[in-house]
Image (tube, grey):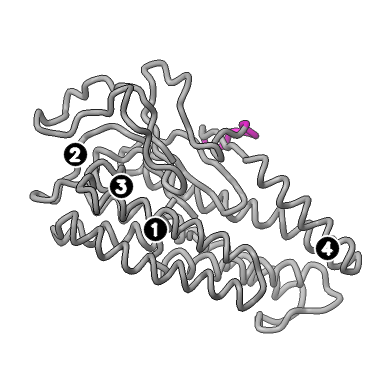
Amino acid sequence: MSSGGARATDDVVPMNPFQRSDAPSAPSQSAEPFPAIGNPVFTPRADDAETNEPWYSRSPKLFTIMGIDVHVSPLLYTYIVFTLVLTAFSASFFLFALQAFASVLLFFTVLVHELGHCAAARAIGGQVSHILLWPLGGLAYVNVDATDAKGDFFVSFAGPLTHAPMLAGWVASFALATGSTDISEWPRDNFVGALAYEGCWLNIFLFLFNVCIPAYPLDGCRMLMALLAMCSVSLTTTATTIICLSTVMSLGVIAYGFWLVQFMPVFVGAFTLAETYKLYTLLKSGALEEHPSFAKYNAMSGRRNTNTSWNVQAV
């Protein structure tokens, strides 16, 4: 799970020597920043010293890994503390400790997922800016403007693919702790087994959620967009397909959250629904090519333009 994932700066991008003369120009300083939430895209300055990012992206750097800066939103710390406080007042010390370790586990799992996107982008000649971790998952800022739709599919799928080795590791840990590979039952009074159980199902859930739910801007939706681009489907048809599927899936996730009385699915569904609505407004106004995810493709040739911008893989 892995699984798209918001505004462009107002800066002018230096002319790309490989850019076609008929390619869309970079936004001027007076241009309206786009988009707002879920698909953060920004244009690097010449000195790469400052960017205009969405409110949830203004987060301090926590550390650097593989040469990639990892930023953590203060909202994530707030969410973890809030969850731990609720657990402390409503559960035993065993469950409280398990919840604390599970929070670290979630942090690690999402980070590895985003590093998968980054590694794939670099493997095909792309660039990586940084990773942002926040309560609704992670965002990997990558630039793969030199690749085609197959490269987009590869980068989008690389995130969810990281859950396979992590799942194998947690199943092995579960087997060592409990003497069984049956992860269908939660092991009581076995802390290591319970933590491994959480790790197994977390990775299964994130993989299925990101791959099987084509809600924008999750990985499954980006993979579908890349497949449609490979088939030379027009931007309008692609956007219409994405909007319809994403709306249905987002409403389904929200309904599922209300049914379980869980606020996280409701927030995730509202997040993807808001991003889908922004895409709909662009389609309705005939400005679809201004969207960073769709501006990458030329509707006639199926090739990507070379307008330099940082695109985001969301989980």
Please, what secondary structure does the residue beneath circle 3 have?
A: loop
Cα separation, mark 1 vs mark 2, equals 21 Å
Write down the region rendered in magenta: 60-66
Distance, label 3 to label 1, CA atoms, is 10 Å
CB-based contact (under 8 Å), mark 3 and mark 1: no
Q: Nearer the viewer, residue 95 or 278?
A: 278
Q: Which mark is residue 87?
A: 4
Picture residue at 64% right of the left edge, 65% below the top:
263
Residue corresponding to mark 1: 216
Which is more toward the observer, 174 or 189?
Answer: 189
Which amino acid is tagged 1?
A: Tyr
Amino acid type, label 3: Ser
* Mark 1 secondary-structure assignment: loop
> For the point 57% across and 67% down, which residue is it?
167
- The mark nearer the N terminus, 3 or 1, is 1
* CA distance separating discs 2 and 3: 11 Å
Q: For numbered disc 2, what is the local secondary structure?
A: loop
Q: CA distance from mark 1 to mark 4?
A: 32 Å
Is residue 65 within the magenta segment? yes
> Reading the chain from its start, which is encountered first: label 2 or label 3?
3
- Which residue lies at the image location 22% right of the left edge and 60% below the top edge? 238
Residue 68 percent coordinates (x, y)? 51, 34
> In the image, which disc is placed on residue 124?
none
Could you tell me residue 232's position as x and y percent? 13, 58
For the residue marked with disc 4, what is the amino acid?
Answer: Thr
Helix or strand or loop: what does disc 4 sit on?
helix
Give the alpha-carbon distance from disc 4 to disc 3, as whole Å. 40 Å
Numbered badge on residue 293: 3
Label 1 neighbour load within 10 Å: few <14, some 14-19, many 20+: many
Q: Callout 2: 10 Å neighbours few (<14), some, many (20+)?
A: many
Residue under label 2, please give it: 305
